[in-house]
Amino acid sequence: MNVAVGVDLGGTKIAVGLVAADGAVRAQTRRETPDGPDAVVAAIADAVAELGDEARGRPVGIGAAGFVDAGRRRVLFAPNLQWTDVPLAAQLSDRLGTPVILENDANAAAWAEARFGAGAGADSMVLVTVGTGIGGGIVLDGRLVRGGFGVAGELGHLPLVPDGRPCGCGQSGCWEQYASGTALTRAARDLVVTALAAGTGAEALVAACGGDPEALEGTHVQDAAAAGDPVAGELLADLGRWLGRGLAAVAAVLDPGVVVIGGGVAGNGDRLLEPARAEFRRRLPATGNRPEAEIRPARLGSAAGLVGAADLAREAAT
Amino acid sequence: MNVAVGVDLGGTKIAVGLVAADGAVRAQTRRETPDGPDAVVAAIADAVAELGDEARGRPVGIGAAGFVDAGRRRVLFAPNLQWTDVPLAAQLSDRLGTPVILENDANAAAWAEARFGAGAGADSMVLVTVGTGIGGGIVLDGRLVRGGFGVAGELGHLPLVPDGRPCGCGQSGCWEQYASGTALTRAARDLVVTALAAGTGAEALVAACGGDPEALEGTHVQDAAAAGDPVAGELLADLGRWLGRGLAAVAAVLDPGVVVIGGGVAGNGDRLLEPARAEFRRRLPATGNRPEAEIRPARLGSAAGLVGAADLAREAAT
Amino acid sequence: MNVAVGVDLGGTKIAVGLVAADGAVRAQTRRETPDGPDAVVAAIADAVAELGDEARGRPVGIGAAGFVDAGRRRVLFAPNLQWTDVPLAAQLSDRLGTPVILENDANAAAWAEARFGAGAGADSMVLVTVGTGIGGGIVLDGRLVRGGFGVAGELGHLPLVPDGRPCGCGQSGCWEQYASGTALTRAARDLVVTALAAGTGAEALVAACGGDPEALEGTHVQDAAAAGDPVAGELLADLGRWLGRGLAAVAAVLDPGVVVIGGGVAGNGDRLLEPARAEFRRRLPATGNRPEAEIRPARLGSAAGLVGAADLAREAAT
Amino acid sequence: MNVAVGVDLGGTKIAVGLVAADGAVRAQTRRETPDGPDAVVAAIADAVAELGDEARGRPVGIGAAGFVDAGRRRVLFAPNLQWTDVPLAAQLSDRLGTPVILENDANAAAWAEARFGAGAGADSMVLVTVGTGIGGGIVLDGRLVRGGFGVAGELGHLPLVPDGRPCGCGQSGCWEQYASGTALTRAARDLVVTALAAGTGAEALVAACGGDPEALEGTHVQDAAAAGDPVAGELLADLGRWLGRGLAAVAAVLDPGVVVIGGGVAGNGDRLLEPARAEFRRRLPATGNRPEAEIRPARLGSAAGLVGAADLAREAAT
């Protein structure tokens, strides 16, 4: 049994792919995420059918944006989907008649990077995905760390700032409130508001959004930074420093050998990673008296989630 | 090979014991910690000799207060011993002619609790020792988590407060600056200073130290709390809340099934643990929508470090 | 010239009154706040006309929710009104043909409390109004402190938490994000969300909002606390502690003799003020070695703003 | 009565001068600060005698490092002198047979700068002295703000960081723990320790202290920064940013027209003040929508305290 189906279930899109044992994606399709578990199950089944005969009867792995139970059957809490305690694996398995396992999406991506990507060969790897929020996955000695209840690696909710910015998880000061694409957009808009009030400053960003702060997106910042705008570059560097700050906390717990940075924002490369590395080094306990994790960009891109989910499903079915 | 020698190397004392395969301590002795690695090696060798014929030639495990390298041979950084990069395992092995492995002391204790103590049976356990500082050890699926460079589980240096209290590790705001015996003593002394200035308040603590804040020790606070003094009880509860706060950060990374609290301060039982549990629950991301770690007192007491070190040595030698 | 007209211009309502030299309100009327400066000027003029012959030709003082310039003529920045740099005093003066002065609303209320209310007789008084946000006013030696540019006493924007909750002023961690009616409502809703997810807890608040967190208002919390509900009482106490925490910062700058707490939330009396006093004392620099400000409830209620504005106008016209 | 005597009483030195009505220092002498109030009174009397006939019988103003009571007679709390509640003015007045008033040293310096120095002409001025700690003084409309109990302007104890670095005042996170000469020295030493451990970095500072971090002083950092060392420059800039951060909090309360920066560290000029100005602007509530305080260096140097104390004494005696 050499191929398996991987599903990446996000708040806006569902990606489904047929993945070979070496991690190669043979075929792939997408759906918009409909409302409610039943419609999601139907959309996935439809996408699997579209992948053709080779996909039929194959084990399916789902990487879902949310908290997943230790048995890998239920979505416990998924704010983006507005789901609480949904038995998704059973529902899809009933529909398709194949084994289905469920995993947190960043865990699935971490597994993929550890097996086939930037973490290959590392005994101790942490993946941090920086997108709308922050996701995390931990692979130690060739095993995905799932925790006592399936919720290990929820790194976006690592508390960094006491009484800090409120988070959708019900807490405040979570890492993803400071080091995500959302945080980047918010910081950029604040800067533009101030510049407009002062009548000076942040010219490149003001131009990019046509003078309307609410029209400014993270991609404007990234493009401006790539084009050499120092204000946009500093916004990215600030995001990188918050990234490094959280990584130092992760290192106090796990001391990973390799940290892989994925997600859309990671596409900024060293404009993001160099400030992250510098801040990580500066904030590491006993810095200078210990070896330090290497911080690398992810290699598998946006397919990592479905590749990892498929590989976990194949492994579970073997 | 059923017995092994365990060593617990601290800043003030060295405990050495002969430990059976079931974790039972057959014999034990102590030395004061001398200055410098050579004298420490000599003191350990002398203590092993005192344990008699049964100890001779047995594998030795050392649990040391400090950062230990991934090869389990060298002490990288030990502020209490004022050591930097000492090849302790090789030195002791040369002296005794037996295999020696080195482990962080809290890691060794975690191993002991996971095998023989409060964590037995848990797939995912974190030990937090609350003493002068905070130590940590992580055992997942029957394996001690050592990290990419041997420094995993340095939980005392988890950053909780940005720009917070300075720490001996070179950073600031580390967990152990808020939730350790040292923090308890400092908070109690500050309270007594204020009460003396105001001419009222904290009567039990003022009496316990004879009106000299610098004479006040953590044990005074613990005794007063045990005797029902509400001021001392609140100091312990505050320590417990800081403990719970850090545990919520640990849970965001590892989601342990069981948290075991050890170290001297853990002797306060539920006066410490109940506030810790309440704060942990309050601060957990997505609290209410997920299962929660059980927070238990340690069971092996102060011998945990040497028991775990011996067991790790026995396992390595097998 | 013994009477003057006072105007309290808020984001939702405009209150206009005729005020005697002893601070007594002879007559009063209200309007909803219309959109835009022109409509606001018309509404005020209309309200003044309604007050009758005695009001005609009298000096007018406006207390406005926002930043006011040092010349007391222009609203520099009023997020609730969505105004930037509006010459309100001139516009109203043109319309009425009488002298008009403009003042920040909390400054006006502080003046009223210092002259006729809870601060009468104090050389050094700070008013803190706790409503939707936090307002502040400072009266030293019988003079209102207006600052170099008219913006003194913007206490709601005192920074308490680095990288804390975002604030409408463009900064983060401002006092009013933690110690206002808005903060109370948010904390109560979060508690209800968690209680609903856990299926237990916060029963009185869950009942008060019929199980819909978004329907919960601050008044529900205040009513429940008044009825003895411990959960609601703790929410108010927590607000009180944040209040005391900010007051300790104010005391480090100003060392006031009297602090007066006004605004809607202050109606909770000692359920709010006792925790505020305790936290203030606990957080005061050199506490125990210095006299401490008395923290009193305001006495003039919701009319304080227009009473103070009128008195300032009368004084300016004399 | 045109001249008066000014005394600047610090923890290590006492400066005594004869000051003319225009602020000019006609004569000056110094003593080391002896132990205990009696010896201090004797030392001051001896120094006044040394100033000669012109000083005899003149009113004396003392500026003391500590909390002073509202009656300007008693030192309430002076950690550097280790005094609590000392009736210093009465003791010196008894000894000299002249009127004596007592003032906080930074208040006295603020008065001098407002009358004769960098704050001359400003209606609303705050002095911040950056030395071992931070001192503050406030002058509004030609009057020194003393607060309800004499302790206004204790700006060094403005709380900036919740649960931050412990302070001698009994609180934690006080401004002076982050933006003082002491903080600068500590940050520089930490950097050197880290550089030595890593075997690279901070070369200029390592050289300046001969490789001994404990030998490194703030003056080394200032000299290195003046010579162009970027590491030292960044340390000063970081101090400047903390300075600006606290000033934004002061502005939320007082909105001063002018901020004067004095004390030894202020000698770094724009290397300190430019980062302070930038951070102040960045952190000001409603920044861009309001005028901003001008941040200026002090003009009177180390004599400011005794000049101001003398002038206050002359004014009180008139």
Image (spheres, coloured by chain):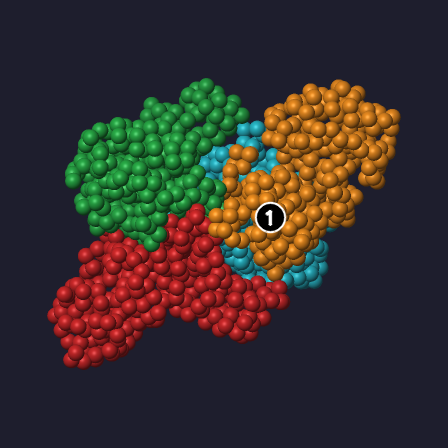
Chain colours: A orange, B cyan, C green, D red
Taking the spot 82% from the left edge, 24% from the top edge, the residue there is: A49
Tag 1: residue type?
A: Ala
Q: Nearer the viewer, residue A231 or B81?
A: A231
| Residue D4 rendering spot, x and y as whole percentages | 19, 71
Question: Can the viewer see residue A224?
Answer: yes
| Residue D12 rendering spot, x and y as whole percentages | 32, 70
Taking the spot 14% from the left edge, 72% from the top edge, the residue there is: D1
Taking the spot 65% from the left edge, 31% from the top edge, the residue there is: A11
**Label 1: few (<14), some or many (≥20) within 10 Å?**
few
Question: Can the viewer see residue C184?
Answer: no
Tag 1 secondary structure: helix
**In the shown orientation, is residue C50 left or right of residue A143?**
left
Location of residue C223 (image quadrant) = top left
Location of residue A66 (image quadrant) = top right
Above or below B10: residue B287: above
Determine the chain carrying the residue at label 1. A
| Residue D173 rendering spot, x and y as whole percentages | 42, 52
Q: Nearer the viewer, residue C35 or D224?
A: C35
Residue on which the image places disc 1: A207
**In the shown orientation, is residue D241 left or right of residue A101?**
left
Taking the spot 74% from the left edge, 28% from the top edge, the residue there is: A31
